[in-house]
């Protein structure tokens, strides 16, 4: 069995819109009320997946959840239209950010030698709190092979859990036993700390991880206050490398020492605040990157074009590439529609280390499937959505039909 890292990107749903629902997510709140372009957004996502496949990386995808979620609105005693924010919450395409779909502990890390997945309850944000039942249903299909996967129910809503966005895994190589680092928040100034320490601890216990190979680390409250609503806005890990902003963690030295003591081969690539400030890190999303190991063993950083175009970030990256560090390549990617809601390349993917043959093949991408998905998106995804349109029955019908059509095409009618 060959364990590989597979990136499961969220296909951007036809209801993608800018409602400004996420307090503490500066891009989303700044773009509240703007017109969105769901078709362009979804095609940008397909192109990102194609580019990663062209690098020789295995690629999977997860599908948009059913929207508008009328049962969510009904459970709160409203029709769509009764309350603008709850209406937008019922329409949200936020499941595209699959880094928040679940926390994943690959088989080498767990006591029973299976890959464990716990869907995130996402209770910190009302528009995301209703994702998990449909996410759970989809994960149970995609990772339904019980010889290899265990799917848990989410952590109780008592403690907020945001999934893989607040979880990092380091290992000498993907298929070896890893060090799982759970990053939680305590405070964030004016903004909520979304990941609760107790949720992280519960996931680690439920996944039956080796207590010697886990760490619980607090996010720097200043980072949350500056707009790093998830840890993956300021840090990303891949194999033995941690790429991080200097101000990502509450206890910088303590965190680095703990990582090095559990994993002596760890390499920490730190970007100092005097080269890239926290504000610029959040604005450019430099760290919301996919740090990937290419088939030839070289590590590459897939960053948003916004980071590539930022003067101080570019200067730092140029110096890094001219040096002798472990990250040898930088690849910019255009996901501007998602970025405007605070979702960069790393938010759009859930990493699962597994043998691709053990995953339901309907969720694995190849070029011909990408072509067919692009055609469906071009034909059926709305070109644009003004948040004022979210009460339109016609638009609701269009969005439902577009998703159903894609699911039929992918032979996944059980998820309709
Ligand atoms: O939860 N944005 C998402 C972005 C999630 C990014 N994910 C990671 N960092 N892994 C969020 O804040 C905006 C939707 C709106 O406001 O309409 C939104 O939900």
Image (cartoon, grey):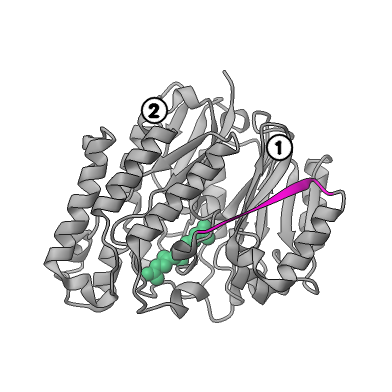
Is the residue 58 above or below the residue 220 in the image? above
**Mark on residue 171?**
1
How many numbered markers are drawn?
A: 2
**Position of 325 compared to 166: left or right?**
right
Image quarter of residue 305: bottom right
Question: Is residue 333 one of those drawn in magenta?
Answer: yes
Does the residue tagged 2 have its C-beta within 8 Å of any atom of ligand 1?
no
**Position of 284 compared to 173: left or right?**
left
Is the residue 375 above or below the residue 398 in the image? above
Q: CA distance from mark 2 to mark 1?
A: 26 Å
* Image quadrant occupied by the C terminus: top left
Identity of the residue drawn at 76% across and 48% down = 327
Residue range (magenta): 325-334
User: Local crowd at mark 1 within 10 Å, few (<14), some, or many (≥20)?
Assistant: many
Specify the principal SS of the magenta part.
strand
Image quarter of residue 110: top right
Residue occupied by mark 2:
361
Front residue of this view, candidates 60 and 35: 35
Q: Secondary structure at mark 1?
A: loop
């Amino acid at each position: 069995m060959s364990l590989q890292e597979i990136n499961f990107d969220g296909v951007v749903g036809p209801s993608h819109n800018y409602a400004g629902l996420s307090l503490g997510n500066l891009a989303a709140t700044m773009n509240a009320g703007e017109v969105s372009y769901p078709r362009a957004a979804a095609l940008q996502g397909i192109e990102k997946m194609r580019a990663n496949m062209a690098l020789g990386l295995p690629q999977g995808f997860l599908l948009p959840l059913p929207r508008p979620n009328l049962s969510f609105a009904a459970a709160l005693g409203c029709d769509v239209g009764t309350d603008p924010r709850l209406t937008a919450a019922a329409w949200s395409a936020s499941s595209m950010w699959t880094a928040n779909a679940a926390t994943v502990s690959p088989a080498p890390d767990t006591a029973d030698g299976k890959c464990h997945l716990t869907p995130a309850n996402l209770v910190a944000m009302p528009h995301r709190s209703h994702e998990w039942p449909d996410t759970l249903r989809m994960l149970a299909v995609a990772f339904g092979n019980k010889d290899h996967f265990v799917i848990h129910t989410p952590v109780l809503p008592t403690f907020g859990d945001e999934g893989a966005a607040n979880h990092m895994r380091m290992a000498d190589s993907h298929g070896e036993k890893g060090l799982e680092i759970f990053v939680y928040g305590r405070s964030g100034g004016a903004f909520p700390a979304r990941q609760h320490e107790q949720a992280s601890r519960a996931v680690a216990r439920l996944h039956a991880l080796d207590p010697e190979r886990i760490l619980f680390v607090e996010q720097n409250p200043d980072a949350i206050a500056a707009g790093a609503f998830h840890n993956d806005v300021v840090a990303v890990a891949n194999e033995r490398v941690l790429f991080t902003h200097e101000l990502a963690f509450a206890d910088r030295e303590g965190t680095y020492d703990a990582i090095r003591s559990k994993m002596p081969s760890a390499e920490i690539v730190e970007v100092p605040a005097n080269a890239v400030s926290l504000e610029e890190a959040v604005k450019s999303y430099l760290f919301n990157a996919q740090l990937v190991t290419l088939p030839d063993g070289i590590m590459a950083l897939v960053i948003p074009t916004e980071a590539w175009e930022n003067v101080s970030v570019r200067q730092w990256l140029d110096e890094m590439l001219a040096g002798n560090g472990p990250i040898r390549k930088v690849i910019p990617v255009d996901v501007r529609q998602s970025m405007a809601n605070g979702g960069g390349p790393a938010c759009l993917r859930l990493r699962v280390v597994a043998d691709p043959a053990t995953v339901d093949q309907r969720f694995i991408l190849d070029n011909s499937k990408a072509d067919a998905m692009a055609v469906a998106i071009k034909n059926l995804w709305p070109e644009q959505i003004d948040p004022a349109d979210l009460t339109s029955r016609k638009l609701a019908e269009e969005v439902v039909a577009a998703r159903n059509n894609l699911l039929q095409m992918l032979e996944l009618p059980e998820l309709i």
